[in-house]
Image (tube, rainbow, N blue to C red):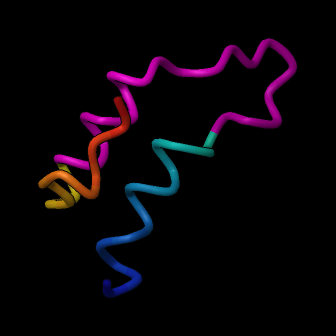
Amino acid sequence: MPLADMWPLTQGWYGNRLDPGYVPASAQHHQDLLAKAGLTGPFWQLD
């Protein structure tokens, strides 16, 4: 995966992890990020 495609995925997944009020995102949020990056199919299912 090209870095230009990976960067938005990693920012959505880890971008706020060091913020003082960090609350982990839901599995659905992460699933949506994967789908937006074109990572679909059984291998990419988080459930």
Is 9 in front, or is 46? Answer: 46
Q: Quadrant of residue 19?
A: top right
Residue drawn at x 34%, y 78% as measured from the top left: 4
Is 27 in front, or is 25? Answer: 27
- x, y percentage for residue 14? 62, 45
Q: Which residues are magenta?
A: 16-35
The residue sitting at the bottom extreme is 2
Residue drawn at x 87%, y 19% as measured from the top left: 20
Up-down relation of residue 9 to residue 13 (above or below): below
Q: Quadrant of the C terminus?
A: top left
Side of 11 relative to 42 (left or right): right
Side of 24 relative to 18 (left or right): left
Q: Quadrant of the N terminus?
A: bottom left
Is 22 in front, or is 30? Answer: 30
Up-down relation of residue 19 to residue 22 (above or below): below
Q: Quadrant of residue 40?
A: bottom left
Up-down relation of residue 45 to residue 23 (above or below): below
Asked if residue 4 is among those painted magenta in the image, a careful observer would answer no
- x, y percentage for residue 33? 30, 42
- x, y percentage for residue 21? 79, 12
Count of all numbered marks drawn on residues in the image:
0
Up-down relation of residue 6 to residue 24 (above or below): below
Residue drawn at x 41%, y 83% as measured from the top left: 3
- x, y percentage for residue 44? 28, 53
Residue drawn at x 74%, y 19% as measured from the top left: 22
Asked if residue 27 is among those painted magenta in the image, a careful observer would answer yes
